[in-house]
Amino acid sequence: MQRHPQRDGRNITVALIPFGAIGLFVTSLLQAPAESEPFPLVSAHEIAADLPALPEIPVVESAQPPESEAEPELLPSLRQSTDWQFVEVSYGDTLSELFVELELDPADLARLLRSGEDAKTLNAMKEGYKLGFRLGDSGDLDEFRLIRSPLQELAFKRDGQEFGIESIRHTPRIETEIKGGTVYSSLLAAAERERVPPTQSMRMVDIFGGKIDFMLDTQPGDQFTIFYEQQFLEDEYVGEGDMLVARFVNRGKEHLAVRYETADGLTGYYSPDGNSMRTGMMRNPLDVFRISSHFNPKRLHPILNKVRPHEGTDYAAPTGTPVRATSDGNITRASRYGSYGNIVIVAHAGGFETRYAHLSRYADGMKPGVRVRQGDVIGYVGSTGSATGPHLHYEVLKDGVPRNPARANELLPSAPGIAAGEMDRFRSHTENLLAQFDTRGRELVRRSAGVSAD
């Protein structure tokens, strides 16, 4: 592996690696938009003065080379080889800067950008993307690839003075896996102990989040089992697929959910009798948190020592913790908003509105007019505005009147279940899936007991 130093001291990794052996990387987080006009400061939205500072979640961990690895030689340009060479995009990189640093012709960048509609992606590169370069015998750029994931890439190939563009989607081989365990302290700790991929742990929280508060309702002895897909390309594992079945036993009560795609192409999770697992509103907008201040219309302000209503719930969590929309809706604001700091406001059906304040940054693409679904990440915990420590201030309003977020999931109706005309199709799908789940579950029990399956 060779490294090419950037002018700001960061390293670009250039590796001669097989094109099909590229891992899955973390997407970048956008900086918050420019500040807009604030509304009058409202002290009720300030966090308590004694809120302890919490550690910041890093955007991505950089892998360290083995101690035995020799110091790499510096690579002045890509021109030492006509083989494929790859550069991993760092946070804040632009393609124009990379072309300069890698000593590539900027005129070729202009040609790439005008090669087709999909080329617009080059102006919105994300951290973790990989860029592939192959030079021709003349030393000019002959082929270029933007690799967004092991399954998605854009391929550009020189055609005379211009470049042609092709969007490539690889079809993975799907295998299934089953995992299960017992909760002793928390679901996430139990899942980590059983080596459940983090994405699947979060899906489990999403599926049952309307029925179970995983921070408050779980207790030692609760159990989980999940049946999910894994994706492979040429025998190389490239990531997880869909969660097919999830089971959680909470305080002796079983919750079972199966994944189903309706005849209209809508995918969701349902109980075996066809009821949707989605409630009208999730109980909490965070997966990991500590409630530092509850909704209280007669709260004694900790600084002013006066009764000032606290019109929402404060969730203390590390900076960078993902914040999720608690219900389907349309974003009406994503900007600076006085004492709220960086805020996302979402309008929902029936005159409901939710507010997510003090964000450190917004999730990719969050702006007024964007439609979000329940569980979508819309921003990240921070301490902007009138906040003395990292936390999320979350509000629920009905026709402009603040309501208690702890009871908001009771205010909106649950999502519709399976239509009567589709029940036969649903039952057939569910029976087949649960039969696989039961068979694999018995295998899991035998594995846990140290007995091999027949």
Image: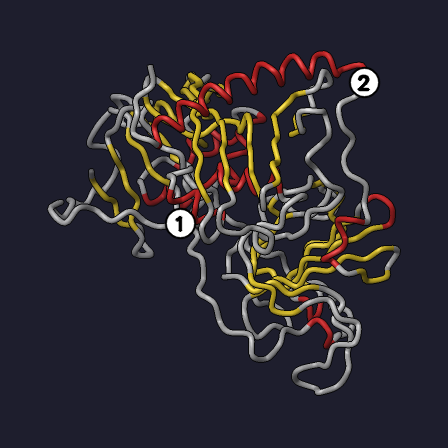
Neighbor class of circle 1 (other Cα within 10 Å; few <14, some 14-19, many 20+) is: some
Please tell me whether mark 2 sits on a helix, a strand or a loop.
helix
Amino acid at dot 2: Ala
The residue at the point 62 percent across, 50 percent down is: 213
Quadrant for residue 190, please give it.
top left
Identify residue for label 1. Answer: 60
Residue 53, compared with residue 247, is above or below; it is below
Q: Residue at the spot x=56%, y=79% of the render? A: 50
Residue 39's spot in the image, x, y percent? Answer: 77, 69
User: Does residue 209 appear in this view?
Assistant: yes
Who is closer to the viewer here, 435 or 426? 435
Residue at left offset 55%, top offset 74%: 51
- Which sits earlier in the primary sequence, circle 1 or circle 2? 1
Residue 350: assigned label: none
User: Label 2: how many residues lie within 10 Å, few (<14), some (14-19) or many (20+)?
Assistant: few
Query: Which residue is disc 2 drawn over?
Result: 420
